[in-house]
Image: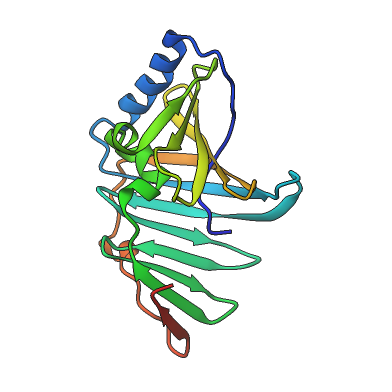
Amino acid sequence: MNRLLMLILLFGLGADAFADARDRLDRFAADLSSLSADFTQLTLDENDWPADQAQGRLYFQHPDRFRWSYGDPFPQEMVADGERLWHYDESLEQVTVREQPPAAESPLLVLTRPELLDRFYRIEESDDEHVLTFRPLTDDGEFELASLFFVADTPAALELRDRFGQLTRIELHDLIRNPTLDPALFEFIVPPDVDVLEGY
């Protein structure tokens, strides 16, 4: 449930189609300082059978702070405060905390910082001007292929295919660009009477 992103592999991209998809990303990210959105997340196993489904709300604050709040049936919080990544599983009464992964490992940050696309990823060819598909330059990341889908100039979905063949699709709804966000959203306070595991 904690894998964040999306897919489509179409070869034969014309240069104009790539330019359109990349231009959409650049226009969206220009002067972007924050965003919020509702999301639905669906994970399919290697046989494309549904393995997990969730919904919740996402918050982002430039340059690298974010919060994923998952609702029922398995409430969870994932909070990146710029230094550490916190994952609170309410049903397990457990918090795991570790050093926040580098920007290169987060396709979400490509959405908000397109310069990372040029530094850490290779663009895959596509014949759809509304889809930007990319893969990491190294083989040690958590995902193998990601795709960002646009409606007009607004990101609408993100897919992530991991190295075990599992696909996670996140659809964004009611996205708000540059909202004023409470800094407390990106601070995690450990609830009482929960176990805290470090370094996981």
Q: Residue at x 53, y 82 (%)?
A: 93
Say which of 46 and 18 sits in front.
Answer: 46
Given the current orientation, which residue lies at the most extreme bottom position?
193
Q: Position of residue 157 (x, y in %)?
A: 53, 37
Quadrant containing the N terminus in the rendered view: bottom right
Q: Is residue 160 left or right of residue 154?
A: right
Q: Position of residue 124 (x, y in %)?
A: 48, 25
Q: Residue at x 39, y 38 (%)?
A: 137
- Establish if 150 lies above or below 193: above
Quarter occupied by residue 33: top left
- Establish if 152 lies above or below 144: above
- Establish if 50 lies above or below 7: below
Report the coloring of the rendering. Answer: rainbow
Q: Is residue 25 left or right of residue 14?
A: left
Q: Residue at x 57, y 48 (%)?
A: 163
Q: Is residue 21 left or right of residue 186?
A: right
Given the current orientation, which residue lies at the most extreme front position?
139
Q: Position of residue 38 (x, y in %)?
A: 50, 48
Q: Residue at x 29, y 52 (%)?
A: 64
Q: Is residue 18 left or right of residue 55?
A: left
Say which of 45 and 67 sits in front.
Answer: 45
